[in-house]
Amino acid sequence: MNYVRLIAYALILGFTGIIQAQGDGPRAYWPQPVGTNIVTPLYSYIGSNQVFDTNIFKKEADFDTNVYGLMYARLLNIKERTAAVVAMLSYGDTSGGLPNIQGSTNGLGDLYVVGILNLHGAPAVNAEEFMTTKYNTLVALQLAFRAPTGKYDASDVLNLGTNRWEFKIGAPLMKFFNWGTPTVTSIEVLPTLSFFTKNNDLGETPGSLSQKPLFGVESHVTQQLNKMLWVSLDSMYRIGGETAVAGTDSDNAYNTFQLGGTLGMYFSRTWGLKLTYGSVIGENADGMSGYMLRGMLSYTF
């Protein structure tokens, strides 16, 4: 297989994972009362050499991607422990590529589902009990999957779906200071490990696309400024995830560090907004580069 053809098949992957590449974000796993529902419409712009899927990229590529997502979360009681299930659907458009491989497309991305179970520090409480509960150190278990439901056609240069499954395990860790006050501070760390099934549909080329496991660490330090505003320093590090196409290694393992910041706002007890900017500031010689902007509006009921 020639070099151009090899890159073309690396581009036949979806963009839903690019939202995951931005991370779950600060305060994503803060405790809430059982029975709480959260609806979050979101928008992201990504200017990057990243090829939609969380780990597929080419150093010389250039893409402009707009992602529109809708996320729903429900807080549950599982054996007196706080738990949550989160589902997200996305729609978007993207354009760009390499000098000799250009394309554009739009449509639905893959379905992404996350389950969270608190292991320590957040017993299941109702809304009244939540007001008097003091949180200190929290440890949780995260299990997630991405299903191949997005738009995919192996004959297209660019696709919005990945045509494969992803399974992820993580352990959200949180430490709170001055919980219940207008100056609450949190330190949040989320180590994750992702596994990928093969994409067995590469069009005319026999074989499949495979990917090694990917390890990542997302972290946030958040500070409440007053009753309405808070800020966060965000970072993410990833390593691993090298791919192979039809048995040929792509030599594209991740070794990337991203840094950014978030401004959060509370308009009321039910409405909130998070605005995030992030950029890659350190990568290996052939690594991922670029930046992203994201806005998340949340309605809690």
Image: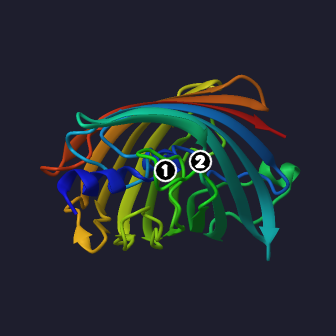
Location of the C terminus by quadrant is top right
Give the colour scheme shown: rainbow
* 43 lies above or below 130: above
Q: Nearer the viewer, residue 166 or 262?
A: 166
Mark 1, residues whose alpha carbon is within 10 Å: few (<14), some, or many (≥20)? many
- Comparing 273 with 146, the one in front is 146
Residue 195 image point, x, y percent: 45, 72
Lower position in the chain sequence, tag 2 or tag 1? 1
Relative vertical location of residue 27 with respect to residue 224 in this rendering, above or below: below
Kind of residue at disc 2: Gly
- Return the x and y of residue 30 as percentages of the image width and height: 62, 51
User: Which residue shows up at 43% across the image and 43% down it?
Assistant: 221
Which residue in the structure is indicated by mark 2?
A: 109
Query: Where is residue 64 drawn, in percent x and y?
Result: 40, 30
Write down the residue under mark 1.
14
x, y percentage for residue 57?
A: 30, 49
> Is the C-beta separation of discs 2 and 1 under 8 Å?
yes
> Can see residue 277?
no
254 left or right of 70 in image: left
Residue type indicated by callout 1: Gly
Q: Quadrant of residue 228?
A: top right
Q: In which quarter of the view is residue 226 placed? A: top right
Residue at 83% in and 54% down: 129
Give the residue displayed 78% in from the left and 54% down from the top. Answer: 74
Q: Around disc 2, counting alpha carbons within 10 Å, would you say few (fewer than 14), some (14 to 19), or many (20 or more)?
A: many
Q: Quadrant of the N terminus?
A: bottom left
Give the numbered dot on residue 172. none
Secondary structure found at label 2: loop
Residue 97: image quadrant is: top left
